[in-house]
Amino acid sequence: MNSRFTYTGIRVRDIERAIRFYTEGLGMELRGRRQMPRTGGENVDLATPGSDRVLELNWYPRKGPVRQYRQGDELDHMAFTVESMGKAIEHLVQHGARLAMEPFFEGGSWVAFMADPDGIWIELLSKDP
């Protein structure tokens, strides 16, 4: 399977506090901010000036499809861009992953979440379903 590591998402308890920390404390720049209708949450893209490596901050409401934040939930997921969503899911299942969230179309891409053999979520992004 051909893939490209895309970004890292971390889960935060207070999105405004996290934005201040990463922008004012670490000098990162706000690159994007959007609502996540599927979960009722919000995510923010940050990067250091001159870098294409993105840190995504994810906040989810207490009530919704994503369980309540617990200490240790900071790493939300890693994201990989793949050529074909269906083929990638099939390939990863054969290597011990399980489908954690069915594919859906959002923001111009197909998105799905897999859980690796240890339960860590991996987001798959593809233009091809």
Image (cartoon, rainbow, N blue to C red):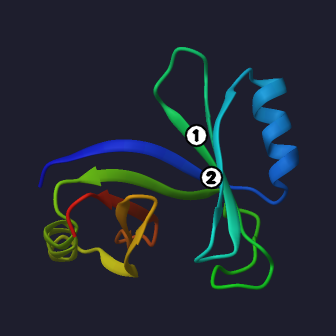
Task: Report x, y in % for residue 16.
Answer: 86, 48
Name the element at disc 2.
strand
Q: Circle 2 is placed at which residue position?
A: 10
* 57 vs 120, nearest the viewer: 57
The amino acid type found where label 1 is placed reads: Leu
Q: Residue at x 40, y 62 (%)?
A: 122
Q: Where in the figure is residue 51, as x and y percent of width and height?
A: 50, 20
Which residue is disc 1 drawn over?
55
Classify 20 as above or below 105: above
Quadrant holding the C terminus:
bottom left
Tell me residue 25's x, y (percent). 82, 25
Q: Residue at x 46, y 59 (%)?
A: 107
Secondary structure under the numbered disc 1 in the rendered image: strand
- Vertical comparison of 38 with 53: above or below: below
Pointer 1 with pointer 2, Cβ within 8 A: yes
Q: Quadrant of residue 36?
A: bottom right
Mark 2 crowdedness (10 Å alpha carbons): few <14, some 14-19, many ≥20: some
Describe residue 75's horizontal placement relative to residue 112 as left or right.
Answer: right
Residue 22 lies, with reference to residue 71, above or below; the image says above
Relative side of 60 to 104, left or right? right
Considering every residue shown, the one lying at the far front of the view is 108
As measured in the structure, the alpha-carbon distance from the residue carrying label 1 to the one carrying label 2 is 8 Å
